[in-house]
Image: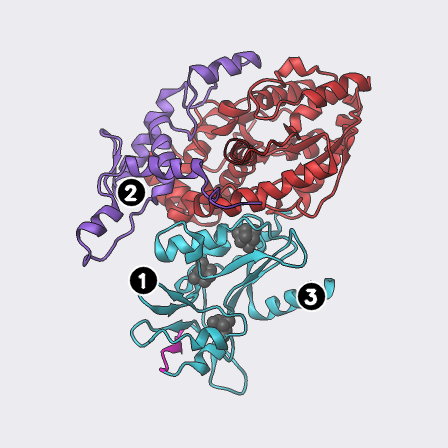
């Protein structure tokens, strides 16, 4: 099914890139800089970071923007009554994340929207 | 109705003695039902994350792969912390031991990475850890509720007492 | 009268949990689900203020305690609204259901969760219930009533993908799915890959296996058998199907033609609704033009 150099899955690589982009200390770069240091693996794997970030910022993994709203209107629907609409729910979620120490252990900086490592 | 809650024992208890010997084995064992497995790979990912903090399933300490003969069926190999472990018997450095909980472990301090245990184990469970150059194998999640069982999406992996597990596997075999 | 939303009793207030994928990617399924449940006379509404169910595949691996904490936010919200959570995504269902079971079994965990939720002004008392949409249809409504409502039997051949988590209990949910699909008049084609996972979680770990050896073989089989539609119920699975179809199309130049449809769409069609009623032809990677054509010609 797969052939030659068509072995790469670009959308997956894009996802990984997105994860690396929101990381402050990138492990592979650090490893090149300090080859004798033992590599350490962050609690949030790079590949999952993009979706984790969206989860923290939107409350759900997918964003509902204007284009999606249009599609929904075509199907006869309004804005979904999830955390997209009810910002209080998102606030509550953030508070839980913050207070239970999850954000800290994952190294997520809420203000900058960055993973520390 | 909720049939799988009937397995309430989530942690290892006292290891059970093997009659006629001084050996002791874990009272629980993980078994896999290929008729239920969907090949989702969550077990391997859970294990890989728990032990190596990565989602790369190649780091997992149990292995699920597609049956080469029956397509669409998935088979698995996971350590059963044997009564008489071949891996333990074969190790030239005596790096493999059975601890007080009955878990068969490899000591990373003694292991020289020769790979004999992999050859000796009937299902080739111990694998090379590329980073530390020692062999690693399932440690039964230290006697906790095994991650692979927690993660299994279709209840194909089960945690059963040894005797029941044996009967269950026999039933599975005769069913086919 | 009690706060306990007992299962199966008439007058149960259902709160439909949308999840992440459905509102963003499958509005047609959302609409169809509501058409069907209203048609069957259920007290069915959205569950409001819901947040992500927290993908058990990711969060349980990272830390089971965090998963419990985050999932119980939804449970607490549902308790406040006095509803029974209904999920049609298997992932959401199993996340909520297992969380509820675990909190019921282990009081220390319940205490831990409540300690964390307290700061956000929430509390779990375990008075709610979690149900799968299949369960609501089959156990609470009943197959007889569904059969009575089928006015336009579908004369199509479908393959189905029920999903891993729906197999967690026993063979109950797959059986419900098949029976309800047969009630719509559709013929189910069995293939060896029916049970195979969609590869959603594997996508993070091993994208090639996840796309080519999971969805790839499924869609290939569908193509070879020339079926009319691929029916599924789980939004998580749909996400992966859509992703795989896009990868095949954009990166490999292979276009699959079997439309991927949601279970409720077929149900709605058999209840006499028209494809336009729930926007069946919009926002899909594979438009179901042929299927709609066939259904029109059929009657
Ligand atoms: S590694 Fe193999 S031989 Fe050793 S205890 Fe496990 S299954 Fe038995
Ligand atoms: S019991 Fe634990 S260590 Fe062993 S295979 Fe399962 S998750 Fe890995
Ligand atoms: S998690 Fe369960 S269903 Fe998935 S591959 Fe592992 S054993 Fe099979």
Label 1: few (<14), some (14–19) or many (≥20) C-alpha neighbours in 10 Å: few
- Horizontal placement of B66 versus C159: left or right? left
Residue A16 visible to an observer of this rendering: yes
Instruction: Tell me the tag on residue C59.
Output: none
Q: Nearer the viewer, residue B152 or C261?
A: C261
Count of numbered badges drawn on the protein: 3
Which secondary structure, mark 2? Answer: helix
Residue B81 visible to an observer of this rendering: no
Q: Position of residue C241 (x, y in %)?
A: 56, 35
Q: Chain of mark 1?
A: B
- Distance of label 1 from label 3 (alpha carbons): 38 Å
Q: Over which residues does the magenta segment extend?
A: B93-100
Q: Is mark 1 within 8 Å of ligand 2?
A: no
Label 2: few (<14), some (14–19) or many (≥20) C-alpha neighbours in 10 Å: some
According to the rendering, which colour does chain C have?
A: red
Residue C157, quarter of the rendered image? top right
According to the rendering, which colour does chain A have?
A: purple
Residue C84, above or below C107: above
Q: Position of residue A97 (x, y in %)?
A: 31, 36
Taking the spot 64% from the left edge, 41% from the top edge, the residue there is C218
Disc number lying in front (2 or 1): 1
Q: Chain of mark 3?
A: B
The residue tagged 2 is A106
Q: Position of residue B93 (x, y in %)?
A: 35, 82
The residue tagged 3 is B173
- Ligand 2 falls in quadrant: bottom left
According to the rendering, which colour does chain B have?
A: cyan
The tag earlier along the polypeptide, 1 or 3, is: 1
Q: Chain of mark 2?
A: A
Taking the spot 50% from the left edge, 67% from the top edge, the residue there is B79
């Amino acid at each position: 099914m797969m052939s030659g150099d068509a072995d790469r899955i670009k959308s997956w690589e894009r996802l990984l890139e997105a994860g690396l982009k929101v990381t402050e200390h990138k492990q592979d770069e650090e490893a090149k800089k300090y080859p004798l240091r033992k590599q350490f693996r962050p609690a949030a794997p790079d590949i999952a970071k993009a979706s984790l970030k969206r989860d923290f910022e939107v409350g759900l993994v997918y964003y509902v923007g204007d284009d999606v709203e249009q599609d929904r209107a075509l199907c006869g629907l309004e804005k979904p009554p999830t955390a997209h609409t009810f910002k209080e729910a998102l606030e509550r979620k953030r508070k839980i994340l913050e207070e239970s120490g999850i954000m800290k252990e994952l190294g997520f900086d809420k203000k900058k929207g960055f993973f520390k490592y | 109705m909720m049939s799988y809650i009937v397995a309430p024992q989530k942690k290892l208890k006292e290891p059970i003695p093997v009659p006629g010997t001084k050996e002791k084995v874990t009272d629980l064992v993980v078994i896999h039902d290929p008729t239920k497995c969907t090949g989702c790979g969550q077990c391997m990912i859970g294990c890989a994350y728990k032990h190596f903090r990565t989602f790369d399933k190649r780091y997992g300490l149990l292995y699920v792969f597609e049956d080469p003969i029956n397509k669409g069926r998935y088979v698995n190999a996971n350590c059963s912390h044997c009564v008489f472990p071949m891996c333990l018997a074969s190790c030239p450095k005596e790096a493999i031991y059975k601890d007080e909980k009955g878990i068969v472990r490899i000591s990373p301090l003694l292991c020289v990475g020769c790979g004999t245990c992999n050859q000796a184990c009937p299902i080739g469970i111990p694998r090379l850890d590329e980073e530390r150059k020692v062999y690693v194998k399932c440690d039964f999640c230290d006697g906790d509720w095994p991650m692979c069982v927690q993660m299994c999406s279709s209840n194909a992996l089960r945690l059963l007492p040894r005797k029941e597990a044996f009967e269950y596997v026999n039933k599975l075999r005769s069913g086919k | 009268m009690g706060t306990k939303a007992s299962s199966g009793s008439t007058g149960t207030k259902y709160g439909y949990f949308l999840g992440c994928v459905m509102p963003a990617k499958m509005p047609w399924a959302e609409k169809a689900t509501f058409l069907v449940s209203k048609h069957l006379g259920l007290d069915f509404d959205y569950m409001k203020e819901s947040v992500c169910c927290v993908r058990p595949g990711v969060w349980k691996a990272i830390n089971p305690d965090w998963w419990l904490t985050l999932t119980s936010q939804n449970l607490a919200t549902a308790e406040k609204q006095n509803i029974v959570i209904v999920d049609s995504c298997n992932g959401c269902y199993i996340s909520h259901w297992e969380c509820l079971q675990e909190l019921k079994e282990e009081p220390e965990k319940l205490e831990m969760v409540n300690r964390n939720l307290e700061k956000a002004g929430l509390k779990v008392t375990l008075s709610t219930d979690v149900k799968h949409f299949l369960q609501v249809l089959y156990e609470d409504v009943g197959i007889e009533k569904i059969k009575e409502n089928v006015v336009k039997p579908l004369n199509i051949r479908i393959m189905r993908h029920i999903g891993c988590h729906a197999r967690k209990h026993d063979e109950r949910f797959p059986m419900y799915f098949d029976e309800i699909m047969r009630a719509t008049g559709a013929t189910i084609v069995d293939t060896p890959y029916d049970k195979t996972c969609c590869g959603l979680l594997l996508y993070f770990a091993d994208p090639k296996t996840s796309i080519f050896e999971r969805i790839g073989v499924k869609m290939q089989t569908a193509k070879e058998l020339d079926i009319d539609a691929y029916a599924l119920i789980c939004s998580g699975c749909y996400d992966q199907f859509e992703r795989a179809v896009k990868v095949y199309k954009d990166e490999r130049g292979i276009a699959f033609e079997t439309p991927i449809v949601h279970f409720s769409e077929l149900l709605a069609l058999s209840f006499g609704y028209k494809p336009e009623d729930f926007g069946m032809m919009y926002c899909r990677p594979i438009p179901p033009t042929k299927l709609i054509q066939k259904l029109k010609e059929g009657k």
